[in-house]
Image (cartoon, rainbow, N blue to C red):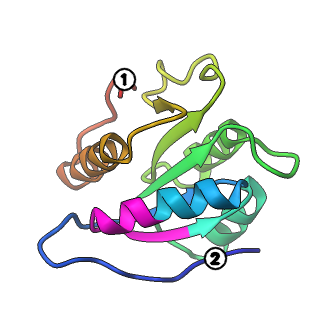
């Protein structure tokens, strides 16, 4: 299991924690570094199974940013469905070079096609964290 516990957060920038789930190490490192530069505390893992193990052990993140296609048997969408049951308070944002899964928009899951702009993803994460702190439900899933 890969988990990066670096907590680089420039002063005066965004607050909150994000778990980046991406099996392509270079994409994961790039996304994680970009989100750290935006001020988030970022954790990383390469598979849905590892992410679920983390949450089962008591791990907490405000938002999960996951690729759709991952190493292992479970997809990013499988991860979303499992977390919706076990950790419904955790925000979820999905990315892929493919089309989003059916039902993602209806369930309020934001989707970013690859390649994405990390600033747009950071804004979506910040909005999700703000919604959580305000007790407001998720939106229609548009980026």
* Few, some or many residues within 10 Å of mark 1 (<14, 14–19, 20+): few
- Horizontal side of 20 relative to 41 (left or right) equals right
Would you place residue 41 above or below residue 29 in this image? below
Q: Identify the mark nearer the N-term, 2 or 1.
A: 2
Q: Tag on residue 3?
A: 2
The percent coordinates of residue 27 (x first, y second) are 60, 53
List x then y, in percent, for residue 9.
29, 77
Looking at the rendered image, the quarter that the C terminus falls into is top left
* Left or right of 96 in this view: 49: right
Tell me the quarter of the picture where residue 116 sits.
Answer: top left
Quadrant in which residue 10 is drawn: bottom left
On screen, 64 above or below 40?
above
Q: Residue at x 49, y 56 (%)?
A: 31
Magenta-colored span: 33-43
In the picture, the disc for residue 142 is: 1
| Alpha carbon separation for disc pair 2 and 1 | 29 Å
- Mark count: 2
* Residue 11, disc: none
Note whether 63 is above or below 36 in the view shown. Answer: above
Disc 2 is placed on an element classified as loop
Secondary element under disc 1, as helix, strand or loop, is loop
Please identify the quarter of the rendering in which residue 63 is found. bottom left
Name the residue: 55% across, 37% down. Answer: 95
Query: Is residue 21 visible to the viewer in this orientation of the structure?
Result: no
Magenta span contains residue 117: no
Q: Residue 56 versus residue 40: which sits nearer the camera?
A: 40
- Depth order, front residue of 13/134: 13
Task: State if disc 1 and disc 2 touch (CB < 8 Å).
Answer: no
């Amino acid at each position: 299991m890969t988990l990066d516990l670096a907590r680089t957060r420039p002063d005066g920038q965004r607050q909150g924690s994000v778990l980046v789930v991406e099996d392509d190490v270079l994409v994961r490192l790039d996304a994680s570094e970009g989100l750290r530069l935006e001020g988030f505390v970022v954790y990383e893992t390469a598979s849905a199974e590892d992410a679920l193990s983390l949450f089962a052990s008591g791990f907490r993140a405000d938002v999960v940013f996951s690729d759709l296609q991952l190493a292992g048997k479970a997809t990013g969408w499988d991860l979303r469905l499992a977390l919706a049951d076990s950790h419904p308070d955790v925000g979820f944002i999905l990315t892929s070079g493919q089309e989003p899964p059916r039902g993602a928009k209806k369930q309020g899951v934001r989707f970013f096609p690859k390649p994405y702009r990390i600033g747009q993803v950071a804004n979506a994460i910040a909005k999700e964290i703000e919604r959580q702190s305000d007790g407001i439900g998720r939106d229609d899933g548009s980026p």
